[in-house]
Image (cartoon, rainbow, N blue to C red):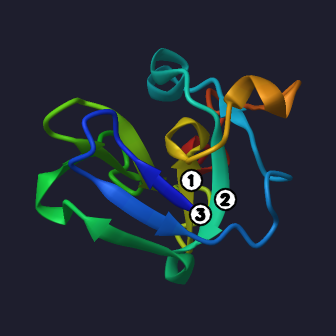
Amino acid sequence: MIGSCHCGAVEIEVSLKDGFATARRCDCSFCSRRGAIAVSARLEDLRVIRGADNLTLYQWGTRTAKHWFCRTCGIYTHHQRRSNPNEYGVNVAILEGVTPRDLGEVPWVDGVNHPSDRR
């Protein structure tokens, strides 16, 4: 699948091994503000085709998760997960031909009480 940010400066190619079965939302302080539905992809299954130099990285807290955005239009494209650093979460809304509403009810994960935050 091909995906791009709003302005088109960043384009990715991704293979979704499990299709949209992994689609989910997160209620952590960052994701709840962002509001995106993410779907899982293995690290080796995502490639930035165009605009890698236009991606900007955002990290906070444990700095384990890495969130990438287009520096021109601000659209979140993907992130390397804190829960599984061997996976990316990909913003469903950037994928060509996909309308997030068509996914129906998307489950929420408890990012507020993330296992990595417990001691």
User: Which is more toward the observer, 57 or 48?
Assistant: 48
Side of 69 where 43 appears, left or right: right
Mark 1 lies on residue: 89
Q: Secondary structure at mark 2?
A: strand
Other-residue count near label 1 (Cα within 10 Å), few / some / many at <14 / 14–19 / ≥20: many
Mark 2 lies on residue: 40
Q: Amino acid at mark 3?
A: Met
Q: Secondary structure at mark 1?
A: strand
Of labels 3 and 1, the one closer to you: 3
Q: Secondary structure at mark 3?
A: loop
Q: Which mark is residue 1?
A: 3
The CA span between labels 3 and 1 is 14 Å
Quarter that holds the N terminus: bottom right
Look at the numbered discs 1 and 2 and tell me whether their residues touch, using CB distance below 8 Å: yes
Q: Amino acid at mark 1?
A: Gly
Residue 53: give x, y in percent of width and height: 11, 61
Q: Amino acid at mark 2?
A: Ser
Residue 107 visible within the image = no
Other-residue count near label 3 (Cα within 10 Å), few / some / many at <14 / 14–19 / ≥20: few
Report which quarter residue 101 is drawn in: top right
Residue depicted at 72% across the width and 31% down the height: 110
